[in-house]
Image: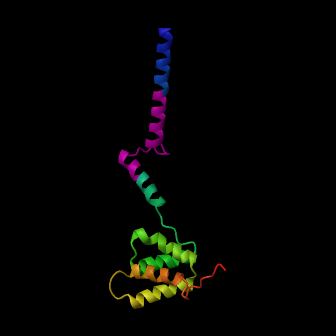
């Protein structure tokens, strides 16, 4: 029984060694086996692949482009960016542009992005007097 366990241990050790050698050859050797790579070159290749993955996609819709323009013009902080995208998606373009123009004209000091959200919030509410219906 002990001999069988020892044989299994050596077989598992041989399999583990095989996998280590295989993985080392995959990651450290180039396609052309005649040219050896330095260990640092392997990391440089991985870093360039990661940089290529981080490309910025252009806006797919017009409302996204409008939202990016508003974010740039009013210097909106990162925590409020989603709100701008939501306003641009749900409201029509003329309404959002009118709010942007009003903000640029009326807000001379302070933070213009706060004023922009106040205008958007006030224009969404109904402007007329409330009509109450009686129960009778």
Residue projecting furthest to the front: 136
Residue 118 in percent (x, y) is at 44, 81
Q: Which residue is outermost to the left? A: 109
Residue 40 belongs to the span the image colors magenta = yes
* x and y, in percent, of residue 27 in the image: 45, 42
Residue 92 or residue 13, whichever sits in front: 92
From this viewpoint, which residue is outermost toward the bottom? 105
State which quarter of the image contains the C terminus: bottom right
Query: Magenta segment range?
Result: 16-45
Q: Is residue 28 above or below residue 113?
A: above
Q: Residue at x 48, y 83 (%)?
A: 122
- Left or right side of 31 for 112: left
Compare residues 12 and 119 and report the one nearer the observer.
Answer: 119
Say if 33 sits above or below 70 in the image. above
Query: Residue at horizontal 56%, vertical 85%?
Result: 130
71 or 40, which lies in front?
71
Magenta-colored stretch includes residue 80: no
Residue 85, x across and y down, in percent:
51, 73
- Write the residue at 51% across / 85% down: 97
Query: What residue is at 41 percent from the left and 48 percent from the top?
Result: 42
Predominant SS along the magenta part: helix
Instruction: Please state the horizontal and vertical placement of residue 134, each as a whole percent of the image.
Output: 63, 81
């Amino acid at each position: 029984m002990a001999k069988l366990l020892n044989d299994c241990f050596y077989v598992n050790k041989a399999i583990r060694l095989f996998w280590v050698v295989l993985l080392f050859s995959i990651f450290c050797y180039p396609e052309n086996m005649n040219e050896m790579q330095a260990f640092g070159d392997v990391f440089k290749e991985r870093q360039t692949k990661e940089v290529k993955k981080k490309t910025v996609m252009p806006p797919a819709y017009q409302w996204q482009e409008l939202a990016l323009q508003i974010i740039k013009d009013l210097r909106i902080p990162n925590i409020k960016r989603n709100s701008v995208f939501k306003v641009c998606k749900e409201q029509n373009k003329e309404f959002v542009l009118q709010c942007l123009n009003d903000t640029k004209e009326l807000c001379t000091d302070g933070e213009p992005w706060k004023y922009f959200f106040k205008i958007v919030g006030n224009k969404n509410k109904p402007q007329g007097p409330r009509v109450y219906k009686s129960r009778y």
